């Protein structure tokens, strides 16, 4: 394996590494602004339609969300160890850790699939299929104890749950899209790691991908409390 | 020659013996593929220059059609809905495909690495990718046009864009989404390059002001454009899935769209104007043979404009039912933007004072910029004041205001820059007297087109209508006549610059005797820009250093 040299337009390898890392941080900044638009919408509508947001939030599956949080943090932990493994030039360990990162990432998406499926069955996907029945007549859904049966929403407020669910799908969907892109990149990185590309001190791609993967984690660490947790309390 | 009355500083090599350098970035590799797959920032700049010129003339054709329709009070040339599509296309093409990438992607791309003493931008592949994204965005825009057009206006106002129109909103929105990423990548590349690729001795306060203003514009590109991206995604989702995030009948808020859209689109006007201001700093310094007055103030005023630019967006929404108290704050902040803008204008004026001024073409355009931008900027203060805004907004006053800034300011700056660095990019001079004529024609045509629109707007003629009351006709005819002159003014450079590629005089390394690093290397430069890494040992715009520099070149000429 030839030691990868810095590209011709950099003076030193150090300069190339710094430039790459700085570029990645800037890219993540643009990602924050991108998600920021949706967080702003969430903030606005949560203030306007608090009862709808509380009721709709109670329909999310907290155990699944909590499990996913654990899965994602574990995946991030494996990634962080992976960066370390690359730095100490341990090829096999790096490969194993990248595979583990991928496995946990896929597990997250798998759980997400079942959550989405549940929402589909309840007609909670915004658009033509959407139904507010559960929020107007909660007594018809005894199998969902989270629903606060004594305090159904008024029909016009119940309509606003659609905005909550739209934001839920837009934000978690955009997050899942970032996960999918990350997993595709992980396949490529795992292949390169196995080949030994990162066993000679050249770790920039692993480091930069690590930054991206942790960013995706952190987005979820904001999404989980905002969407699943903070509205539950007043109903119980 | 007596220095006091020097007529020109152009210093060309002996034309009987001068040749273009044997090896340069243009002939380093041959074939179409060597261009389409290039990583060379200079070649990518040329690719961008060709593409944005193409889109400029398409956008310009729509401007011509708009003015032609407005020649008579009735809507007779085209039906009203076709007219809507015309001004929408004009806006989308001119803003997203011309003004935003104009100076940064062409001149900035070409010059920033050279001005910093670097071989290339930090990420050459991302630079090329950004050009391809631009092309995809451009192609989709043309597709939307050919398929039947869009008629939302370039602002995609909801719920008009989500519910009431069946034109190709999604195609156009996708185009802007993709072109937006091209802009993000350009900005990201510039910021990293400016932080990490400066040559030894190139401290932050030795950088040319051109680089400073691009740095400020890049911050806006990187921080603002993603917000536009998400706003567009939400519009597209609302149109396709019928969800109601901006739809009041479903509890959504159309004002939310306005907030997200203008959070980008107001800073976007600074993305457009800041690089132009960078050009003006270089040109004015060179043709008055003086260091830019108050270098540090001009540098920081760029950053200040970028910073303030993020906190004024609501002034686009004063008549849309926002809170009076927030309107007060945003009005005040809007006025504050005038401060750093005025710092620039005053400092350029003081640079001219007691300078050895000569009147080459770039300088004529720069003078045009200073006058027209000042008018455009001050009328912006009218619009930023709450009472006046209610009378003037959505009229031709606002049309005239932003065309004074964008066309009178930015386009003048772009042409100043293209003429100024043309010898560096091509190795040949443009024809001087013809180009001076074009500069004057452009200036006259511009004023004839847009001054009447201030009056029209003040009298109450609304924008975006194909027909108008008959008493407005005289001023509209004046404006259309001006647009014709302006069109000629823009065609001229296209023709003579094309001509000069083959027949222009050989320019030599430093025809203007300017101080920038880019003038110390051969024209056109070699692919690596510098044969060896330069060392910056003097301040920017140091004409004394230039005078002392005799045989000892910063780099050897190949």
Image (spheres, grey):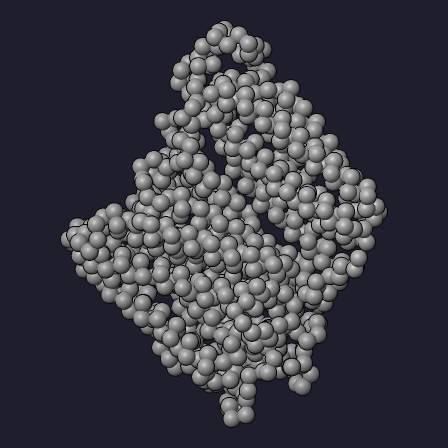
Residue lying at 64% horizontally and 81% vertically, measured from the top left: B557
Horizontal and vertical percent position of residue B493: 39, 73
Q: Which residue: 42% across, 81% down?
A: B431
Identity of the residue drawn at 31% across and 40% down:
B165
B234 above or below B274?
above
Q: Quadrant of residue B522?
A: bottom right
Of B58 and B423, the residue lying toward us: B58
- Looking at the rendered image, the quarter that the C terminus of chain B falls into is bottom right
Residue B375: give x, y in percent of width and height. 38, 60
Give the vertical position of B203 relative to B165 (above or below).
below
Is B222 placed left or right of A202 in the picture? left
**Camera-side residue of B331 and B447:** B447
Q: Is residue B504 above or below residue A28?
A: below
Q: Quadrant of residue B321?
A: top left
Residue A37 place in picture, x, y as percent: 52, 38
Q: How many marks?
A: 0
Give coordinates of residue B20: x percent, y percent.
55, 83
In the orientation shown, which residue stands out farthest toward the left? B470
Q: Is residue B244 visible?
A: yes
The residue drawn where x is 40% and y is 31% is: B242
Q: Is residue B328 left or right of residue A201?
A: left
Q: Residue furthest bottom?
A: B16
Q: Is residue B308 visible?
A: no
Q: B16 above or below B395?
A: below
């Amino acid at each position: 394996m030839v030691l990868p040299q810095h590209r011709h337009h950099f003076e030193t390898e150090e300069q190339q590494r710094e430039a790459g890392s700085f570029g990645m941080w800037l890219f993540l900044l643009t990602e924050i602004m991108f998600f920021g638009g949706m967080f702003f919408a969430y903030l606005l509508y949560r203030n306007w339609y608090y009862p709808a947001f509380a009721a709709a939030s109670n329909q999310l599956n907290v155990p699944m969300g909590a499990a996913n949080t654990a899965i994602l943090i574990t995946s991030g932990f494996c990634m962080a160890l992976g960066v370390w493994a690359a730095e100490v030039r341990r090829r096999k360990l790096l490969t194993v850790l990248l595979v583990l990162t991928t496995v946990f990432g896929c597990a997250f998406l798998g759980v997400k699939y079942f959550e989405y499926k549940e929402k589909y069955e309840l007609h909670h996907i915004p658009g033509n299929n959407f139904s507010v029945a559960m929020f107007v007549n909660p007594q018809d859904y005894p199998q969902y104890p989270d629903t606060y049966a004594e305090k159904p929403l008024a029909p016009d407020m119940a309509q606003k749950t659609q905005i909550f669910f739209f934001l839920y799908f837009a934000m978690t969907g955009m997050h899942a899209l970032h996960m999918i892109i990350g997993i595709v990149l992980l396949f490529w990185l795992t292949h390169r790691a196995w080949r030994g590309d990162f066993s000679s001190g050249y770790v920039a791609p692993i480091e930069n991908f690590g930054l991206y993967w942790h960013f995706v984690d952190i987005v979820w660490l904001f999404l989980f409390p905002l969407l699943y947790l903070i509205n539950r309390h007043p109903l119980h | 020659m007596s220095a006091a009355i020097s007529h020109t500083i152009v210093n060309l090599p002996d034309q009987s013996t001068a040749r273009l350098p044997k090896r340069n970035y243009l002939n380093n590799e041959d074939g179409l593929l060597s261009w389409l797959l290039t990583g060379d920032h200079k070649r990518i700049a040329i690719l961008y220059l060709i593409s944005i010129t193409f889109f400029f003339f398409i956008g310009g054709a729509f401007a011509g059609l708009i003015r032609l329709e407005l020649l008579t009070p009735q809507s007779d040339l085209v039906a009203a809905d076709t007219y809507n599509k015309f001004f929408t296309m004009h806006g989308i093409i001119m803003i997203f495909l011309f003004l935003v990438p104009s100076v940064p992607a062409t001149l900035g791309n070409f010059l920033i690495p050279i001005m910093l003493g670097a071989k290339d931008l930090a990420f050459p592949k991302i630079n090329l990718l950004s050009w391809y994204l631009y092309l995809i965005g451009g192609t989709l825009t043309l597709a939307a046009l050919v398929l039947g057009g869009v008629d939302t206006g370039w602002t995609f106002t909801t719920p008009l864009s989500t519910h009431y129109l069946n034109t190709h909103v999604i195609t156009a929105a996708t185009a802007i989404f993709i072109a937006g990423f091209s802009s993000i990548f350009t900005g990201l590349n510039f910021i990293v390059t400016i932080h990490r690729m400066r040559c030894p001795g190139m401290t932050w306060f030795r950088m040319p002001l051109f680089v400073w203003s691009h740095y400020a514009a890049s911050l806006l590109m990187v921080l603002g454009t993603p917000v536009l991206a998400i706003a567009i995604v939400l519009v597209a989702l609302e149109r396709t899935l019928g969800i109601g995030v901006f739809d009041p009948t479903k509890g959504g808020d159309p004002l939310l769209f306005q907030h997200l859209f203008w959070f980008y689109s107001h800073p976007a006007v600074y993305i457009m104007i800041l690089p132009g201001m960078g050009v003006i700093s270089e040109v004015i310094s060179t043709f008055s043979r003086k260091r830019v007055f108050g270098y540090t103030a001009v540098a920081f005023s760029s950053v200040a404009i970028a910073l303030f630019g993020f906190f004024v967006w609501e002034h686009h929404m004063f008549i849309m039912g926002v809170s009076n108290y927030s309107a007060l704050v945003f009005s005040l902040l809007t006025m504050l933007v005038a401060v750093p803008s005025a710092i620039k204008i005053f400092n350029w004026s003081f640079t001219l004072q007691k300078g050895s001024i000569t009147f080459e073409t770039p300088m004529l355009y720069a003078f045009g910029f200073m006058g027209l931008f000042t008018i455009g900027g001050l009328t912006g203060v009218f619009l930023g004041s709450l009472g006046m805004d209610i009378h003037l907004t959505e009229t031709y006053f606002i049309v005239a205001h932003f065309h004074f800034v964008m066309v009178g300011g930015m386009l003048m700056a772009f042409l100043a820059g293209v003429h100024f660095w043309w010898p560096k990019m091509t190795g040949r001079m443009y024809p001087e007297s013809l180009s001076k004529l074009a500069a004057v024609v452009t200036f006259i045509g511009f004023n004839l087109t847009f001054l009447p629109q201030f009056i029209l707007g003040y009298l109450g003629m609304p924008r975006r209508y194909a027909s108008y009351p008959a008493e407005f006709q005289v001023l509209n005819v004046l404006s259309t006549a001006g647009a014709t002159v302006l069109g000629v003014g823009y065609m001229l450079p296209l023709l003579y610059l094309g001509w000069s590629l083959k027949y222009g005089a050989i320019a030599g390394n430093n025809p203007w005797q300017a101080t920038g690093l880019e003038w110390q290397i051969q024209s056109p430069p070699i692919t690596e820009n510098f044969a060896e890494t330069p060392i910056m040992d003097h301040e920017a715009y140091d004409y004394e250093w230039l005078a002392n520099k005799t045989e000892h070149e910063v780099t050897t000429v190949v």
